[in-house]
Image (cartoon, rainbow, N blue to C red):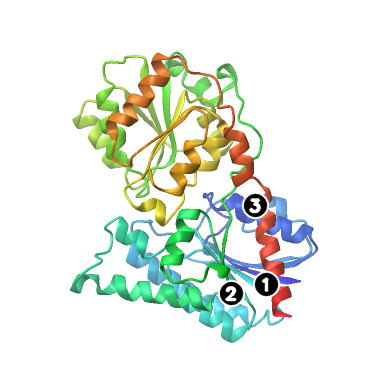
Amino acid sequence: MNFLFVLYIGFDQHGPSVHLLKEMIRQCLESGHHVRMIVTNHGGSDPDIPVELQHYKNLHCDVIYDKSLKKSALVKRYFQDFRYAFLCKKIYKRYKDTDAVFLQSNPSPLIALKMLKRTLKAPVLFNVQNIFPIDAGVLHKLPTHGIKGIPYSVFRKMQQSAYKKSDLIVTISEDMKQTLLNEKVPESKIRVIYNWSYSDEAAEIADEDNLFLRDHPELMDKFRVVFAGNLGAMVNPVLFAEAAEKMKAYSDIIFIIIGDGNNMNLLKSMAKEMNLTNMVFFPYQPKEYARHNYAMANVNINALPKGIITTCMPSKTSTILNAARPMVVAVEKESSYAKILSEVDKCVVVDWNDSKGFSDAIIHFYEENIVSESSNAREVFKSLCSVDNAKKYVECLEELKNEAL
């Protein structure tokens, strides 16, 4: 079969979706399918075709060069994606024999779907990683009511039209599936496939072998509360600061914040104003440190703003589960996500704004000296987030082709 992957990222830069997309494409190629992929290049240093895919003869890549925009530049990014869809149209004409299309998650899929349907007339799998514009409304980036809410209403109707034009929608959590159902998407059109971490290898790394701790031996004897990754709009930094403030008296407990993101400066500012000497910051670490960042935690943490779990799924979920360290997560307790994590040994789930419950949970792990691994976190990881999920996408594309026959 001939599959076309229309990607709104490039492999020239590292990102949370890169490893899953690479594995998905590799699985297609290994199954004997021909893959054509359209990618962007934003000036990164990595090759447009990942090294592990370069030897496949049944792979072809078209690259569209464009500048990179900050995630916070919502309107500019929307119109950049709109422009990208028109640039892709020129490429579609070369692939009239396409059997099925994978359209990567993006805020402006309607124009892409219209062009794909007119040019190729092939079934399209739309991968929904974020539910726009509902996510922007939840985060107050777009007004949702009154005259100022008109753009939100227009964008929402456009997304609903895109769902109708899609032949299959794959989203990444049960909470997001429910949001799509609320948007009148037929349940028969929706599949839930959780995102895969970058490795199925267990993150069992002794402190003395931990690359991050070798670089920062001053943290070796501390009780380490770790957040690693993108501290963007999908994270509630206020709760981190409030929890850390409640724990100032515990000199052995240190909050280690690794990464970057739109909310990083806010958290740093709060830490300075509140004199949070128990919170330290580090930039993104090299790729080979990823497993080590989570493995060195005495407690891994995450905190989600109210409502956001209905529109996205934290990308670090699979990595934290695979690390199998104790964890504390703040999210709406009635969500499917909270119910999953509540079944995980040594995982405490508190409500999204419960900073006292958040700090009390960390203190409990500290005072009770709970340092052993979770007894079932990796089993939950394997059942939801393993590399097998990449193969499920391939099966969905094959299913679309077979249904079209």
Q: Nearer the viewer, residue 157 or 350?
A: 350
Q: What's under tag 1, amino acid-wise? A: Leu
| Residue on which disc 2 sits | 167
The Cα atoms of the two marked residues, 3 and 1, are separated by 17 Å
Q: What's under tag 2, amino acid-wise? A: Asp
| Residue on which disc 3 sits | 389
- Residue at 52%, 64% (x, y): give it: 8
| 14 relative to 354 in the view: left or right | right
In the rendering, at what x and y percent does residue 123 appear?
63, 76
Q: Residues within 10 Å of mark 2 (few under 14, many from 20)?
A: some
Q: Residue furthest bottom?
A: 118
- Badge 1 marks a residue whose secondary structure is helix
- Badge 2 marks a residue whose secondary structure is loop
Is there CB contact under 8 Å for labels 1 and 2?
yes
Q: Nearer the viewer, residue 59 or 228?
A: 228
Q: Residues within 10 Å of mark 3 (few under 14, many from 20)?
A: many
> Where is the C terminus found, in terms of image quarters?
bottom right
- Residue at 45%, 54% (x, y): give it: 175
| Residue on which disc 1 sits | 400
Q: Nearer the viewer, residue 134 or 293?
A: 134
